[in-house]
Amino acid sequence: MTSMPDFGDDGGAGVDMSEAARQLELAVHDAQVAYDCVGLGHIDRAHTHAITARAAVDAAETILRAALAGNESAQVED
């Protein structure tokens, strides 16, 4: 896995972008498992993995929004 830069010194409010990347990787995995479960007829398991995929995407979005908000405030201060 490649690491993403930490934009803390550049105005990203110290947000660790590698965590956003990790959450997106988890979302991709859970979405693939959900897809496979549907194909196998395991609808309850597919539903569970779809929910966890959505949670991982939401977590990544929150991290990215924090980074963008920190970057915007840093640009205003400059």
Image (cartoon, rainbow, N blue to C red):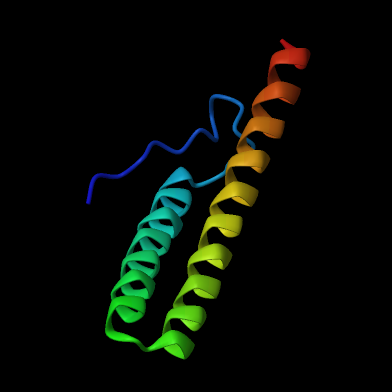
Q: Quadrant of residue 12?
A: top right
Q: Is residue 17 above or below residue 29?
A: above
Front in this rendered view, residue 63 or 10: 63
Q: Is residue 37 left or right of residue 58?
A: left
Q: Quadrant of residue 38?
A: bottom left
Q: x, y (%) of residue 26?
A: 39, 64
Q: Is residue 78 left or right of residue 57?
A: right
Which residue is outermost to the top?
78
Q: Is residue 27 above or below residue 42?
A: above
The residue drawn where x is 30% and y is 44% is: 3
Front in this rendered view, residue 36 or 75: 36
The residue drawn where x is 39% and y is 57% is: 22
Which residue is outermost to the left?
1
Q: x, y (%) of residue 73?
A: 75, 24
Q: Is residue 60 left or right of residue 34?
A: right
Front in this rendered view, residue 53 or 47: 47
Front in this rendered view, residue 72 or 53: 53
Q: x, y (%) of residue 6?
A: 45, 38
The residue drawn where x is 49% and y is 47% is: 16
Q: x, y (%) of residue 25?
A: 35, 57
Total numbered labels placed on residues in the image: 0
Which quadrant holds the C terminus? top right
